[in-house]
Image: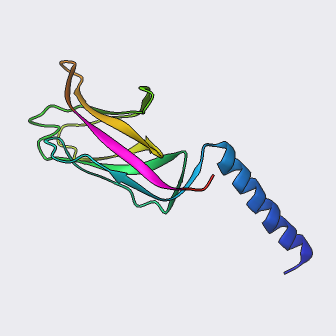
Amino acid sequence: MTAAHTRRVVLTGIVLLLALGTSGCLTLQPTVAGPSDSAVFDDVSTSEPWSSGHVTTTVTLSEAATTDKGVTKLTVVDASGDSYDTALLDSGQTTTTMFFPTNQTSTLLATNTVNGTVVEKRPVTASGNKLI
């Protein structure tokens, strides 16, 4: 490996660490916990080895969520009460991808936008090994 190549690798690593450090935080092995005992949500999971600022999750809904229960929208509300992510759902849809802020407990809201009701709300905690 030449000196120029080594220098580029080191500089690229420094730039990457600075970008991750200023964009929020770097979390290794992120996990999500919740919801349980739900008529709307079957599972919230992640398969990411690391995350920066948020955890990308797969939200799995019950078969009845978007049909019998009438859920048309999911919203992640962070610990400060602000809307963090939303997903619009089609009838019969049972999975969607959503973002949760790392290292805090958020609220996952399932709403029916046709009649304006909250069908269900559950806490979801996204955590991991925070490095930066």
12, 124: nearer the viewer: 124
Left or right, residue 22 beside residue 111: right
At 33% across and 35% down in the image, what residue appears? 107
Q: How many marks?
A: 0
At 71% across and 55% down in the image, what residue appears? 16
Q: Quadrant of the N terminus?
A: bottom right
Q: Looking at the picture, how far across and down is residue 13, in whole percent?
A: 74, 62
Q: Looking at the picture, how far across and down is residue 54, in whole percent?
A: 49, 45
73, 29: nearer the viewer: 29
Read off the magenta span: 121-129
Q: Quadrant of residue 31?
A: bottom left
Name of the residue lying farthest toward the right? 3
Which of the colour schemes (rainbow, by chain, secondary structure, one colour) is used? rainbow
Q: Quadrant of residue 3?
A: bottom right
Q: Looking at the picture, how far across and down is residue 66, in whole percent?
A: 17, 37
121 shown above or below 103: above
Q: Quadrant of residue 117?
A: top left
At 15% across and 46% down in the image, what residue appears? 37
Name of the residue lying farthest toward the top? 115
Instruction: Determine if the magenta segment contains residue 125.
Output: yes
- Magenta: predominant secondary structure element? strand
At 39% across and 40% down in the image, what residue appears? 105
Name of the residue lying farthest toward the bottom? 1
